[in-house]
Amino acid sequence: MNSELLREYITYIQLEKNYSSHTVMEYSKDIDEFFSFMEAEGISDVNDVEYIEARLYITKLYDQGLSRTTISRKISSIRSFFKFCNAKFDVNDQAFRLLHHPKKEERLPAFFYEEELNLLFDSCKGEDPKSLRNIALLECLYATGIRVGELISIKVSDVDLSLGIVRVMGKGRKERYIPFGSFAQTSLEAFLSKSRPILMKGKKHQTLFTNLRGDPITASGVRYILNSMMEDAAIHGKIYPHMIRHTFATHLLSNGADMRAVQELLGHSHLSSTQVYTHITKEHLRKTYMNTHPRA
């Protein structure tokens, strides 16, 4: 019964809600984990889940040391599943509808300062196919602020070098066109003319960025490339593709960009998602003031 409900729900969020494959996988995992909890508690039917069990499950998640952000996401996944089951199969969804989300952690997104970013760019200079691909990949991420899932989905035909625009398909299959500057254009031209034909090794596909075997690059492949850049640049700390997206937004706002324009470039549905970057720029100004003003 429960597995059938989950299959129906997964089909719904894939076909009707147009959720990304990553989101579908996370939701499915969250709900499966809750089913395991139900089994351990001797609950065989989702109709029998009550508020007390929902509270107990959240307590167990806290005991596992999970962050409030992760717990909040799991609540959303399970609540969405129960809401669907209630609408389609009249399943009781009171338990998770009454559950409150944990208070959000005040954590600002990590980003690179311009000096650090320049070190990253310097780390992948070269005229060999691999270096040309890496610099084009980094330039594309920083010039557009796109998500890694959007980057690996770009086709060659999505890039218009004459206009300096790339077409991406964002969350919920929402299409948007993003401009890029001269640095990205130069690196993409070099990659397409000198690097990609060699890296392709005779393979036939239209995905823009490829790995060294000529296959379409994956999200884990992008992370590996960025980590290699960090090592070559001798920059300490962690890097992840979304960090370049945070850097893109922070640098735009720090240099006077309009928040609504940044929201559109990022593909955010709500302005509140973009406003977090104003906190970063304000915190940067505060730290600069405290470190440099004689009477701070």
Image: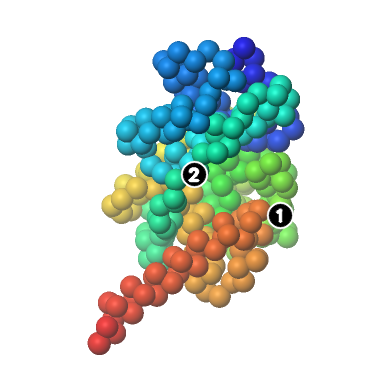
Question: Disc 2 to disc 1, how far (Cα)?
Answer: 35 Å
> How many numbered circles does the render carry?
2
On screen, residue 219 versus residue 8, left or right, reads: left
Q: Quadrant of residue 21?
A: top right
- The amino acid pointed to by label 2 is His
Residue 278 screen position, x and y as percent: 50, 67
Instruction: Answer left or right for 172 relative to 49.
Output: right
**Residue 5 located left or right of residue 38:** right
Residue that protrudes farthest toward the bottom in the picture: 295
Q: Quadrant of residue 273?
A: bottom right
Taking the spot 47% from the left edge, 23% from the top edge, the residue there is 33
Q: Look at the image and tell me in which quarter the C terminus lies.
A: bottom left
Query: What element does badge 1 sit on?
Result: strand
N-terminal of the pair, mark 2 or mark 1, is 2
Residue, disc 1: 177
For badge 1, the amino acid type reads: Tyr
Relative height, residue 71 to residue 215 (above, below)? below
Residue 249, position in %: x, y?
A: 53, 62
- Residue 16 visible somewhere in the drawing: yes
In the rendered structure, the answer to whether residue 175 lies left or right of residue 33 reads right
Q: Residue at x 37, y 30 (%)?
A: 60
The quarter of the picture where the N terminus appears is top right
Closer to viewer: mark 2 or mark 1? 2
| Quarter of the rendering containing residue 106 | bottom left
Q: Nearer the viewer, residue 110 or 131?
A: 110
Figure check: 239 above or below 293: above
Q: For label 2, count other residues whose C-alpha is less than 10 Å away and answer few (under 14), some (14-19) or many (20+).
A: some
Q: Which residue is mark 2?
A: 101
